[in-house]
Image (cartoon, helix red, strand yellow):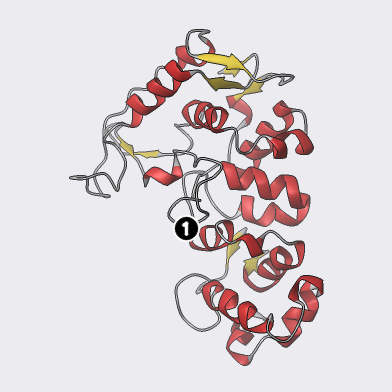
């Protein structure tokens, strides 16, 4: 489907968004994450003036151009008028809701009978701008991916290529809720350590809690800040100072 613009929901549209997902999230009471649920999105309301308003200066948005995470984010940013404009709008909650609704078939998976597997609420419901930046809140499948693309350009491509649209991902979710992540040297360090360039994936063992994983990297970076100005170091400088338990990811 091709839309004339990107839109944002009106209060009536927000109600439609909430109705679509009501009781369907994997972390809702009485839900089992393994259970698929029925979902009946009404895409006709996404251009209905009773429920939406066009985002100023946005151009057409074609779902057919959205094949994977990388193309989804590129298509959104292009329709919003480029990286600078898109970055300024990442906290537009009603717009993010509209995009989530429009892309729901790509942000979920289905079983053989057409029932949907819906993840945790935070993956679909964008946070309020003033909400505390915690891992439980900052998990939206579009918002932070748009942000890292707009801030870091090609340096962030591996993040967009390594995860399917419906997948949060251990490394992505570790990255996106931490304010210290949004520095180019940290982004490039994560790519240098954990990105498997030959297969558009992260190296085995990058997630989890074992020594050398991404979680332990953030712990070590906190320790480094006591001695060095990490913000002023290059990713290569940090890489060379990492202790031996990161060696398995340096190959």
Residue 218 at x, y percent in the picture: 58, 74
Residue 196 at x, y percent in the picture: 63, 66
Res. 37 image quadrant: top left
**Is 234 left or right of 28, judged from the image as shown?**
right
**Residue lying furthest left:** 30
Taking 231 as reference, is 103 above or below it?
above
Identify the element where label 1 is drawn. loop
Residue hosting label 1: 135
Res. 230 image quadrant: bottom right
Taking 225 as reference, is 186 above or below it?
above
Q: Nearer the viewer, residue 228 or 218?
A: 228
**Residue lying furthest front:** 130
Q: Nearer the viewer, residue 141 or 107?
A: 141
Residue in the image at 29% along x and 48% along y: 27
Residue in the image at 67% along x and 56% along y: 158
Quadrant location of the N terminus?
A: top right
Taking 130 as reference, is 230 above or below it?
below
């Amino acid at each position: 489907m091709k839309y004339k613009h990107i839109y944002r929901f009106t209060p009536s549209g927000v109600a439609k968004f909430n109705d679509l997902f009501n009781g369907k999230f994997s972390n809702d009471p009485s839900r089992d994450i393994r259970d698929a649920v029925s979902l009946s999105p009404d895409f006709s309301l996404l251009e209905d003036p009773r429920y939406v308003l066009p985002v100023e200066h946005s151009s057409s948005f074609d779902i057919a151009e959205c094949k994977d995470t990388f193309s989804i984010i590129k298509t959104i940013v292009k329709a919003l008028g480029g990286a600078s404009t898109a970055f300024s709008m990442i906290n537009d909650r009603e717009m993010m809701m509209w995009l989530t609704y429009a892309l729901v078939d790509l942000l979920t998976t289905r079983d053989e009978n057409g029932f949907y597997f819906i993840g945790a609420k935070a993956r679909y419901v964008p946070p309020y701008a003033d909400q505390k930046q915690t891992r439980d809140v900052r998990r939206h499948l579009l918002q932070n991916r748009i942000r890292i693309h707009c801030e870091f350009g090609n340096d962030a491509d591996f993040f967009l290529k390594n995860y399917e649209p419906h997948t949060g991902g251990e490394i992505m979710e570790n990255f996106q809720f931490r304010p210290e992540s949004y520095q180019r040297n940290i982004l490039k360090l994560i790519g240098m350590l954990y990105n498997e360039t030959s297969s558009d994936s992260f190296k085995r063992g990058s997630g989890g809690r074992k020594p050398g994983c991404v979680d332990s990297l953030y712990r070590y970076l906190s320790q480094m800040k006591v001695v060095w100005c990490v913000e002023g170091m290059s990713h290569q400088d940090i890489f060379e100072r990492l202790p031996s338990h990161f060696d398995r990811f340096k190959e």
